[in-house]
Image (cartoon, helix red, strand yellow):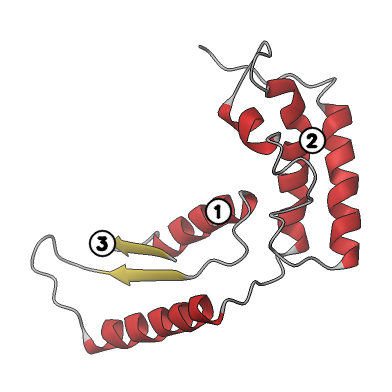
């Protein structure tokens, strides 16, 4: 669950950005709660905000307690598997070793199109596998470097 407090605008954009990153790492569902507080140190929760907090936290809690894992969006599988495929050029001991390379090429992830405990539909497995291969091929021609 991603929670933001903002003084005006940007809360939902922040939630979308963080949720997108988490989904790209294998989290299958993200809840978001943005509360606008128009004061620095004297904010009191309004009844509208309290209702919003109760609703979102209740949904989140019920979902976690249910143990149900959601199907990820197919759109999430594309970048996940591109990065997973490209990670092979950035593993430990390579010229441009990165934490991403370590993460995506670890033995646990290298066999699965997504986090293995998350359910996937057949077409999602196929799409993920195709984009994994595209990433592996592309990694031979595209080099991403970082200053060390």
Task: Give the total number of marks visible in the rendering.
Answer: 3
Kindly report the distance in space between the C-alpha atoms of the residues bearing marks 1 and 3. 24 Å
Of the image marks 3 and 2, the number of the one nearer the N terminus? 3
Q: Which residue is mark 3?
A: 7
- Disc 1 vs disc 3: which is toward the camera? 1
Q: Which mark is residue 102?
A: none
- Mark 2 and mark 1 lie on one chain; the one further toward the N terminus is 1
Q: Is disc 2 placed on a helix, strand or loop?
A: helix
Kindly indicate the quadrant of the structure image that contains residue 117: bottom right
Q: Is residue 95 above or below residue 15?
A: above
In the rendered image, residue 44, in percent from the top left (x then y), is placed at: 13, 77
Image x and y of residue 73, in percent: 72, 64
The residue carrying mark 1 is 22
The residue to which callout 2 is attached is: 85
Question: For the point 85% across and 44% down, which residue is it?
Answer: 131
Kindly report which numbered mark, 3 or 2, lies closer to the viewer in this rendering: 2
Task: Determine the CA span between mark 2 and mark 1.
Answer: 18 Å
Residue situated in front as seen by the camera: 104 or 7: 104
* Residue 119 pos. (x, y %): 75, 67
Mark 1: secondary structure: helix
Residue positioned 68% across, 54% down in the render: 115
Q: Residues within 10 Å of mark 3 (few under 14, many from 20)?
A: few
Quadrant in the rendering for residue 87: top right
Looking at this view, is 87 or 12 the one in front?
87
């Amino acid at each position: 669950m991603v929670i933001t407090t903002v003084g005006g605008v940007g809360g939902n954009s922040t939630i979308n950005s963080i949720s997108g990153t988490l989904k790209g790492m294998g989290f299958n569902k993200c809840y978001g709660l943005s509360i606008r507080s128009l004061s620095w140190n004297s904010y009191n929760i309004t009844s509208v905000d309290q209702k919003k907090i109760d609703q979102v936290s209740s949904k989140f809690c019920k979902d976690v307690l249910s143990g149900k894992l959601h199907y990820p969006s197919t759109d999430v599988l594309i970048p996940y598997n591109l990065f997973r495929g490209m990670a092979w050029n950035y593993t430990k001991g390579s010229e441009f070793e990165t934490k991403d390379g370590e993460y995506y090429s670890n033995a646990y992830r290298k066999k699965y199109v997504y986090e293995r405990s998350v359910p996937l539909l057949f077409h999602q497995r196929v799409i993920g596998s195709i984009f994994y291969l595209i990433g592996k091929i592309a990694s031979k021609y595209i080099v991403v470097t970082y200053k060390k």
